[in-house]
Image (spheres, rainbow, N blue to C red):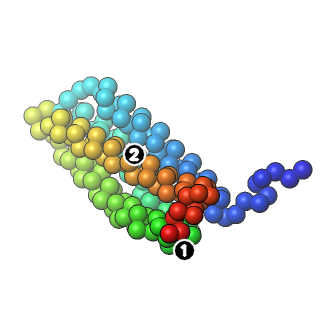
Amino acid sequence: MADGRANRTGIDVETEEAFREHAEISEGVAEFEKWLGRSEGAGAEWAALLCERLLPLVKILKSHFASEECSNLYADMHIRAPGFADAVERLFDEHYDMIREIESLVRASRSIESTFDCDREELTRRARRIIFALRRHEAEENEILYQACCDDAGKDEAKR
């Protein structure tokens, strides 16, 4: 008995892997947002906790973004679905900006030495902007992958 997996292509496997990674990132972002909403403390102690939460996120994102940027799934997008090529290029450009912003927030949180130095509201606002940007970014990538690789109607539209 053959199941559908026997006919899968490398692109099918890469697409599934991309969706899985995006789901894991979304879970991590949701956990970070939950922590951000209920975290207590102030000053250097709170800033250190913020930094502690951001460092694993930036590590995961650097690896994820690097794998996306060298993946055949995206490299061939201009051939497979030319209608999405510009969007993919723009999303790749966002990778650097998001990493830079998270690393900037890490530096800011590390520089806090006392309660008086800590503008928790500003750091929280910046963290929420990062959360929003990541969610939008990953959702847009998922939509492109779905339309270009999974949805036959989307494949036809993307070729235009």
| Residue 41 at x, y percent in the picture | 24, 26
Label 2 and label 1: CA atoms lie apart by 27 Å
**121 w.r.t. 133: above or below:** above
What amino acid is labelled 1 in the image? Ile
Evaluate if marks 2 and 1 touch, with contact meaning CB atoms under 8 Å apart. Answer: no
**Picture disc at residue 79:** 1
Question: Can the viewer see residue 69 in this picture?
Answer: no
Seen from this angle, which residue lies furthest bottom?
79
| Residue 8 at x, y percent in the picture | 72, 59
For marks 2 and 1, give the one nearer the viewer: 1
Residue at 42% x, 34% y is 31
Seen from this angle, which residue lies furthest left?
116
What amino acid is labelled 2 in the image? Arg
Residue at 34% x, 60% y is 94
Quadrant position of residue 125: top left
Residue named by callout 2:
135
How crowded pointer 1 is (Cα within 10 Å; few <14, some 14-19, many 20+) is rated as: few
Seen from this angle, which residue lies furthest right?
1
